[in-house]
Image (cartoon, helix red, strand yellow):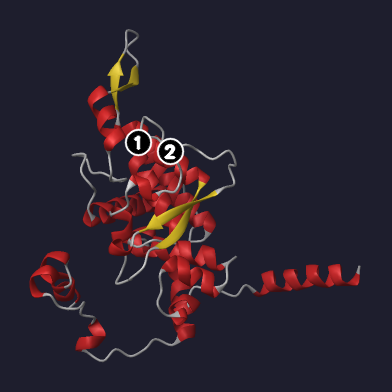
Amino acid sequence: MMNILEFINSEDVQEEIQHDTIKMKDIIEVKAEDPETAKKRIEKISLTRQQSAFFLDTIRENGNKRDYAICRTFIDSGMRLKELVLLNKSDIQVPIDEKGFYILPEDANEFIEVYLRAETTKGELKDRTTFITYDTLRSLNDMIYDRITKLRKDTNDVYRPVIQRNKAAEEVKREELFTNIKGKRIGKRGVQDIVKKYAHLSDERIADEDIDCPVDYGKNVSVHILRHTALSHYAEVLTVAEVQTIAGHSNSQTTDKYIHVDREQMKQKLKINNMKFNM
């Protein structure tokens, strides 16, 4: 059923049949999930900050700059898969220099706005904004540099990156942010394969290094789980309304599933507040 719906709701078919997006609930009666059950489910399948860092470290050790930048962008921003593949370089809200690289802010703690155009989002009628960190922006520059260079052996038989003029010229005019090996905009399946590849490599690393880890990356980690992870991290510090804006949820009940109450953290906040009050 999901495959049929995905086909019917694809852009090409929608353009032909001129019909509103069809949802599963339009076809069958879907029983609403209990909010507390949903919270537990999302908490279970979201990665902690430490688990996210482990996943990204695995990519850094085994992968290329593009794969690392893609997964960092997911874990930072909480955007959907379609939104990520349709990102343009200009959607990252910092200036781009004459060579096609992002100009890094002076403050390394700065959060950078990412503009999500309405036509790239899930049934939304307006644009919205999410964020990436300084380190993720820097990884995008590393990806761009990797895209315009080629390893060549020098006189000392050492391979060094050399800028290719044609690719450097293309980069200045490039619109799409993430590309495939042919230099065209990357597709959704390509991104899904990237995430699955490093999820399995994370499991191999856990086994090789005999790490005690409760997460089965290969079984659980997907692009959707990376979105869950980002929104759960946002929910630690932002209000439900703020997370809802970032996530692009039309219903606050959907966003509420990402709010995980840490009782120890609550006690510490109350303790600090009480100490200030009594001073």
Label 1 sits on a secondary structure element that is: helix
* Residue 175 position by quadrant: top left
Q: Residue 144 carries which label?
A: 1
Question: In front here: 19 or 163?
Answer: 19
32 relative to 115, above or below: below
Which residue was labeled with disc 2? Answer: 102
- Which residue lies at the image location 53% right of the left edge and 69% below the top edge? 242
191 relative to 166, above or below: below
* Residue 78 position by quadrant: bottom left
Judge from the rendering whether residue 274 lies leftward or rightward of residue 22; answer left or right: right
The residue at the far right in this view is 279
Query: Could you say where residue 146 lies in the image, as x and y percent from the top left?
Result: 34, 32
Q: Are marks 2 and 1 in contact (CB under 8 Å)?
A: yes
- Which residue lies at the image location 31% right of the left edge and 33% below the top edge? 172
Amino acid type, mark 2 = Tyr
Q: Nearer the viewer, mark 2 or mark 1?
A: 2
Label 2 sits on a secondary structure element that is: loop
Q: Can residue 23 be seen in this view?
A: yes
Rate crowding at label 2 as few (under 14), some (14 to 19) or many (20 or more) other CA atoms within 10 Å: many
Rate crowding at label 1 as few (under 14), some (14 to 19) or many (20 or more) other CA atoms within 10 Å: many
Q: Which mark is residue 52?
A: none
Amino acid type, mark 1 = Ile
Judge from the rendering whether residue 33 lies leftward or rightward of residue 24; answer left or right: right
* Residue 218 position by quadrant: bottom left
15 relative to 38, above or below: above
Q: CA separation, marks 2 and 1? A: 9 Å
Query: Could you say where residue 147 lies in the image, as x and y percent from the top left?
Result: 30, 34
Query: Could you say where residue 2 lies in the image, as x and y percent from the top left?
Result: 20, 75
Question: In front here: 43 or 246?
Answer: 246
- Which residue lies at the image location 33% right of the left edge and 55% below the top edge? 84
Q: Can residue 63 be seen in this view?
A: no
Q: Quadrant of the N terminus?
A: bottom left
